[in-house]
Amino acid sequence: VSTDALAGELARVVGAAHVLQDPDLRAPYETDWTRRFHGTARLVVRPADARQVVEVVRRCAAHAAAIVPQGGNTGLVGGGVPRQGEVVLSLARLDDMGPVEGGQVTVGAGATLGAVQRHAADAGWEFGVDLAARDSATIGGMVATNAGGTQVIRHGTMRAQVLGVEAVLADGGVMRRLGGLVKDNTGYDLAGLLCGSEGTLGIVTRARLRLVPRLPHRVTVLLGAPDVAAAQRLLGAVRAAGVPLDAVEWFRSEGVRLVREHAGLGPPPCGEHPDYVLLEASDRTDPTEQLAEVLSGLPEAAHAAVAVDPPDRRALWAYRERHTEAINAVGVPHKLDVTLPAPVFAGAVTALPSVVSGVDPAAVTVLFGHLGDGNVHVNVLGPAADDERVDEAVLRHVAAAGGSISAEHGIGTAKARWLSLSRSEAEIAAMRAIKAALDPAGMLNPGVLLAP
Ligand code: FAD
Ligand code: 2HG
Ligand code: ZN
């Protein structure tokens, strides 16, 4: 029998089966995907709809119980797991999806990306964001982190797909704007504000999403390159030629070795190289020839692997998409998701392994990412989970080169202490003012984004 009065009140709102207090039942909600971040939740509550979310928020506020919103728990910066006995509010049950109409759809925050992709495809459309965690990551989490993924070069980040949101604020008020108006200049863009707010300003319960036309012809090409600078030149060439690119991804031999060991894959069909670039293009007519023509002038084209059929394309993507799980299989990684400006990209990226080994000579650095966006995923294996020296060195290196300390994963708790490397005093003061206005008691995701 629970002795927690809040648990009893919440059970009356959502049903006892959806208030988890047992440590074994709480456990999956308490540790993040990387296993680097974990804490203890007072309890986990799983409302069924926005009305229940309002009641849960009100009751938590009455008990001064801080809330950590959680979707699919695939976030990589420690923002979706509890720290010090907060209530974890899981949005997973809010997974309803409305009809696709006029290239738009309204979906519940708990709908997974994969479910939304299938729902859009059934109606002849596509969703403009894709990422490898598609079967677990939720739309609410993707709004909250302003997720990027592999198609940003074509369709932009999550923010560009969001036409409106429904969200529950810290005082239990509901902000709802789901009409799907493309033009709507009636003041502050509150939905846009929630994109990338990481659960600190409101709890997203539904989102109105823009869909993109489904193009019938798609081609994927995997190429080897001698170094980062060559990979970047390749990107420049395909971009300048106006190829209708969906993705330009990059990885290296050390990552391929881990992926092959973990997934049991053979050597990449383009042969073995220090660096690899994966290109994808789609159009109303087959873009293969246009791409082949552009690539024909480049030395990298000699060993290109080209795929058009979905299973063949997926086989090429596996070398890129399986990096995250392959790294996790080796140990608990330090993940530093950064962007670097194009003019210094190759030099700054090439220096990264020595920045890491300068701090920890035994550490293993695996680099890969979204080349088209200048986004590098610096993964470091070796340092203890709570040893932040490597994190600090990498983030300072990136900031000194004019980059951003978070490209797409967010700040979470992992990088909160370094926010000032990427944001000015005035910007942080403005963010704190917004936070104080919307959540004066600091109930929503304390410690995330803005350090205490
Ligand atoms: P969670 O992990 O549950 O939460 C993430 C953050 O959002 C937390 O701060 C949480 O409090 C908040 N939050 C969650 N739901 C809500 C809500 N409804 N309202 C308010 N706040 C909420 N990310 C990319 O950007 N690009 C990638 O390519 C990419 N690839 C990935 C591949 C793998 C294999 C994995 C494991 C992760 C990847 N990610 C990527 C990171 C992750 O998938 C995204 O950050 C995703 O948006 C998180 O969604 P989620 O539902 O799992 O959120
Ligand atoms: C990706 O692009 C994700 O695959 C995860 O953003 C990156 O594992 C990572 O560091
Ligand atoms: Zn990524």
Image (cartoon, helix red, strand yellow):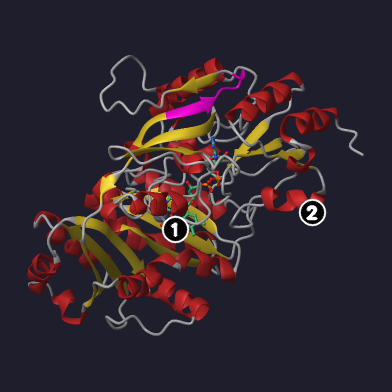
* Number of numbered discs: 2
Q: Is mark 1 within 8 Å of ligand 2?
A: yes
The one nearer the camera, 50 or 255, is 50
* Residue 154 visible in image: yes
Q: For mark 1, does the 10 Å Cα neighbourhood hold few (<14), some (14 to 19), or many (20 or more) residues?
A: many
Q: Earlier in the sequence, mark 2 or mark 1?
A: 2
Q: Is residue 430 left or right of residue 83?
A: left
Looking at the rendering, which quadrant does residue 8 occupy? top right
Look at label 2 and name its amino acid. Asp
Q: Position of residue 57 (x, y in %)?
A: 66, 25
Comparing labels 2 and 1, the label whose residue is closer to the camera: 2
Q: Position of residue 180 (x, y in %)?
A: 33, 29
Look at label 1 and name its amino acid. Val
Q: Is residue 331 left or right of residue 44?
A: left
Say the numbered circle drawn on residue 378.
1
The one nearer the camera, 355 or 338, is 338
Question: Which residue corresponds to the image point at 60% horizontal and 67% vertical from the top-left?
Answer: 331
Looking at the rendering, which quadrant does residue 289 occupy? bottom left
Quarter of the image where the N terminus is located: top right
Residues drawn in magenta: 165-172
Q: Are marks 2 and 1 in contact (CB under 8 Å)?
A: no
| Residue highlighted by disc 2 | 24
Question: Which residue corresponds to the image point at 53% horizontal and 15% vertical from the top-left?
Answer: 437
Q: Position of residue 252 (x, y in %)?
A: 36, 71
Question: Which residue corresponds to the image point at 7% horizontal and 72% vertical from the top-left?
Answer: 297
Q: For mark 2, does the 10 Å Cα neighbourhood hold few (<14), some (14 to 19), or many (20 or more) residues?
A: few
Q: Is residue 153 above or below residue 7?
A: below
Ligand 2 shows up in the quarter that is bottom left
Q: Is residue 320 above or below residue 197?
A: below
Is residue 99 magenta-colored? Answer: no
